[in-house]
Amino acid sequence: MAPLEFLFVAIGIISIILLYCSIHFFIKARNCKTIVEFPVDSNTHNLEFKTSGLFSLCFIGTKNISSDGSFKAMIYSSDFASITLKPTFPNWTFKEKGVYGVEYFKFNIKKTGCYTLDLKNHEGLKTSQFVLPLNALLDHQTDNSYLKVRIKQAVPSWQRLFSVLALVLGINGLTWGIMIGVFNIFSAE
């Protein structure tokens, strides 16, 4: 086997591995279980986590959400220990059963048990149906009365970014490998 052929076989194998990892992470992100869902106007809600791990606080009924700074969300355990809510960057948009949603906070639950979610000043949330910030300038703010809060299992942001990058590189590598194999681009003849 010539060195160039070996290189393209290696690129093909790496592309297949990247595609497998990408699809695996996409399926993992798609199969995250919903813990609870309720309207945003309910200020305090009791949560029960039966497993530990990474979870996200999502808003259902919008593609883009921002706060004017007055909105606060806090999670407390039964012994009043505060759980740190980290803003999600980027805010991942998803669609489930025909309804759009956006991940806003992520948090880590170390111990299973009962927790309390406290939402304050939900009127400070600004929602729109456009994902790009430029389009959001032209869009009118949508009504928050239909907005829902969903707590669900989450996937780390690095896994999502890796899955997108791996998908692009994997498809690109396989496409070039097939084209080179079929058309013998580098043949010496």
Image (cartoon, rainbow, N blue to C red):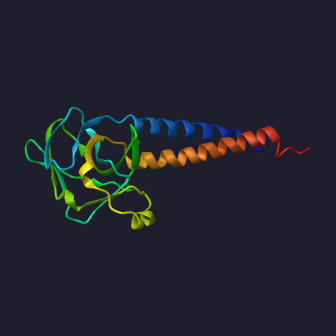
Above or below 118: residue 126: below
Above or below 113: residue 102: below
> In the image, what residue occupies the spot 18% across and 38% down?
111
> In the image, what residue occupies the spot 51% across and 47% down?
164
Q: Report the label total.
A: 0
What percent of the width, then of the height, locates residue 49? 20, 35
Whether residue 98 is visible to the viewer of this picture, yes or no, is yes
Q: Hey, which residue is sitting farthest top in the picture? A: 50
> In the image, what residue occupies the spot 24% across and 33% down?
51
Whether residue 11 is visible to the viewer of this picture, yes or no, is no
Q: Going by the image, does 81 lie left or right of 172? A: left
Q: Hey, which residue is sitting farthest left in the picture? A: 79
What percent of the width, then of the height, locates residue 121? 17, 59
Above or below 28: residue 74: below
What percent of the width, then of the height, locates residue 138? 42, 66
What percent of the width, then of the height, locates residue 112? 18, 35
**Quarter-wise, where is residue 31 in the image?**
top left
Q: Going by the image, does 39 lie left or right of 87? A: left
Q: Going by the image, does 170 lie left or right of 105? A: right
**Quarter-wise, where is residue 50 in the image?**
top left
